[in-house]
Image (tube, rainbow, N blue to C red):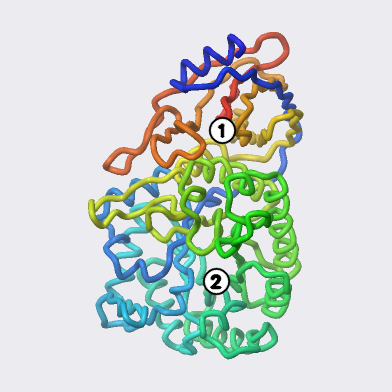
């Protein structure tokens, strides 16, 4: 082990093998800034029936802090439960456990939009399409706009219509040509009640049938934001040899990232052609609630840091990681009913780290290394260059040589006791407190040795390098 790497390891409190580190050369083109990452790029997606539980209230200071830690963001209400949520204006929030049907009313939205105001987040507010009650959806949107228009990003019409038949919401044979007139009729009613309303959709699940492309083309002029969903691996895959099998190795493969970014490119291009912005409104590591041992471990954070930057670099408006608030899932935050407290999971720390570096203009960057190392860079409004390094290699440590033309800076590390750790994760030496607050504790200072700055990265770790 090199002396430099050993000193960094001891500083970070890591237990490491004696394997030698491998070099990496990283070149950042500071003079060629690209597009700006939207301020509200980060987001969380929740199942809409979470509204019947005591989470989204203006008095819930812990959950408010957990959102505010991430900066300005976008909270999406959607998921499969959006089609099982009914609007009854005078009714209190309730859930029929036998049928899965949830009921919300004005008091529910009063709480939600009070919560959003406290967090300074916007809402991508999902409304029911499958229930064939567009008048009710129009009334729900009208009340949301009345009490919280400043907190509304858009209203998303329906959820995953290309899977309606899977959930017995439509008869077999339901396809995009059948969906389009239904969606158009509902949108007409919603717009008639709410002139100027901003709408999003079609909120399609990942498929190879071009439903998203056909839907946004068919709804041109009716939607402002095109939305779709993506899960890196399949929770339904049972073949360990499949590239979609939910394993740690598959999640960290460069081929998995390349496949997912290709879908983003296709959907972004289709949305732009239809005159829409594009947001990846629901995504995560493994579909069907995630996979214990993968989605709830530090590996998911290593995947997420790279994924966030890759999608930002390709021009999407933002990402909403789906959250079912359940432990052992893909959720960044869960609710422990037995302990009556929120628990923060590894994915949340990836979002914290992205918030630190994922703002400003994208900078071109190149990486040369034998390790599975990724790097992304931004130029902030403060003139500082921020480089996000993710060592997704679980066996090789890396010594990264940064060619930037800058001579000093600092490092904030994203660390865990092991790649498969579910707890003990920190960013900048700090974990979130019981009150939901987070603040950086540990920052290293670095200075150039010769022409380059050098940063040591243990196997399975990430770091934000900020250059003055």
Is residue 388 visible from the viewing direction of this image? no
Q: Residue at x 72, y 42 (%)?
A: 34
Q: Position of residue 66 (x, y in %)?
A: 37, 47
Q: Position of residue 12 (x, y in %)?
A: 46, 21
Q: Quadrant of residue 227?
A: bottom right
Is residue 271 visible from the viewing direction of this image? yes
The vertical placement of 246 against 411, above or below, is below
Q: Earlier in the sequence, mark 1 or mark 2?
A: 2
Label 2 packing within 10 angstroms: few (<14), some (14-19), many (20+): some
Q: Position of residue 191 (x, y in %)?
A: 53, 82
Q: Residue at x 31, y 82 (%)?
A: 89
The mark closer to the camera, 1 or 2, is 1
The vertical placement of 399 against 321, above or below, is above
Q: Nearer the viewer, residue 142 or 133?
A: 133
> In the image, which disc is placed on residue 364?
none
Q: Nearer the viewer, residue 463 or 270?
A: 463
Q: Residue at x 56, y 53 (%)?
A: 285
Side of 266 relative to 240 (left or right): right
Q: Nearer the viewer, residue 174 or 147?
A: 174
Q: Position of residue 304 (x, y in %)?
A: 56, 46
Check disc 1 and report the residue beneath it: 460
Q: CA distance from mark 1 to mark 2?
A: 42 Å
How many numbered marks appear?
A: 2
SS at mark 1 in the image: loop
Q: Quadrant of residue 151?
A: bottom left
Quadrant for the C terminus in the image: top right
SS at mark 2 in the image: loop
Side of 325 relative to 180 (left or right): left
Q: Residue at x 42, y 42 (%)?
A: 422
Check disc 2 and report the residue beneath it: 198
The vertical placement of 352 against 311, above or below, is above
Side of 272 relative to 144 (left or right): right
């Amino acid at each position: 082990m090199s002396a430099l790497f050993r000193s960094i390891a001891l500083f970070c409190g890591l237990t490491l093998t004696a394997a030698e580190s491998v070099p990496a050369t990283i070149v950042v083109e500071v003079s060629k800034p690209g597009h700006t990452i939207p301020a509200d790029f980060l987001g969380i997606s929740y199942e809409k029936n979470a509204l019947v539980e005591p989470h989204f209230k203006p008095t819930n200071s812990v959950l408010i802090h957990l959102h505010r830690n991430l900066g300005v963001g976008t909270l999406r209400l959607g998921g499969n439960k959006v089609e099982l949520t009914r609007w009854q204006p005078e009714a209190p929030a309730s859930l029929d456990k036998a049928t899965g049907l949830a009921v919300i009313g004005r008091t529910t939205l009063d709480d939600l939009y009070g919560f959003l105001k406290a967090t300074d987040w916007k809402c991508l507010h999902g409304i029911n399409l499958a229930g064939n009650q567009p008048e009710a959806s129009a009334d729900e949107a009208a009340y949301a706009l009345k009490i919280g228009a400043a907190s509304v990003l858009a209203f998303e019409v329906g959820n995953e219509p290309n899977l309606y038949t899977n959930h017995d919401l439509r008869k077999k044979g339901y396809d995009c040509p059948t969906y389009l007139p239904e969606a158009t009729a509902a949108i007409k009613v919603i717009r008639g009640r709410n002139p100027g309303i901003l709408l999003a959709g079609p909120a399609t699940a990942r498929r190879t049938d071009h439903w998203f492309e056909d839907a946004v083309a068919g709804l041109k002029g009716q939607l402002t934001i095109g939305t779709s969903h993506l899960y890196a691996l399949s929770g339904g895959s049972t073949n360990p040899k499949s590239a979609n099998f939910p394993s740690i190795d598959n999640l960290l493969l460069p081929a998995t990232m390349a496949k997912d970014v290709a879908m983003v490119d296709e959907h972004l291009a289709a949305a732009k052609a239809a005159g829409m912005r594009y947001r990846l409104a629901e995504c995560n590591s493994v579909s069907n609630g995630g996979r214990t041992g993968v989605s709830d471990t530090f590996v998911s954070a290593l995947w997420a840091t790279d994924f966030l930057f890759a999608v930002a670099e390709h021009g999407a408006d933002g990402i909403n990681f789906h959250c079912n608030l359940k432990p052992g899932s893909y959720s960044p935050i869960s609710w422990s009913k037995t302990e009556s407290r929120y628990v923060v999971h590894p994915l949340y720390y990836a979002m914290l780290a992205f918030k630190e570096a994922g703002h400003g203009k994208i900078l071109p960057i190149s990486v040369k290394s034998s390790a599975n190392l990724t790097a992304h860079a931004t130029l902030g409004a403060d003139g500082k260059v921020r480089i996000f390094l993710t060592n997704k290699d679980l066996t090789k440590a890396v010594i990264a040589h940064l060619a930037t033309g800058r001579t000093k800076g600092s490092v904030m590390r994203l660390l865990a006791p092991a790649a498969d750790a579910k707890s003990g994760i920190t960013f900048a030496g700090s974990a979130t407190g019981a009150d939901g607050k987070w603040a950086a504790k540990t920052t290293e200072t670095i200075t150039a040795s010769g022409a380059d700055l050098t940063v040591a990265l243990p196997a399975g770790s990430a770091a934000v390098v900020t250059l003055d």
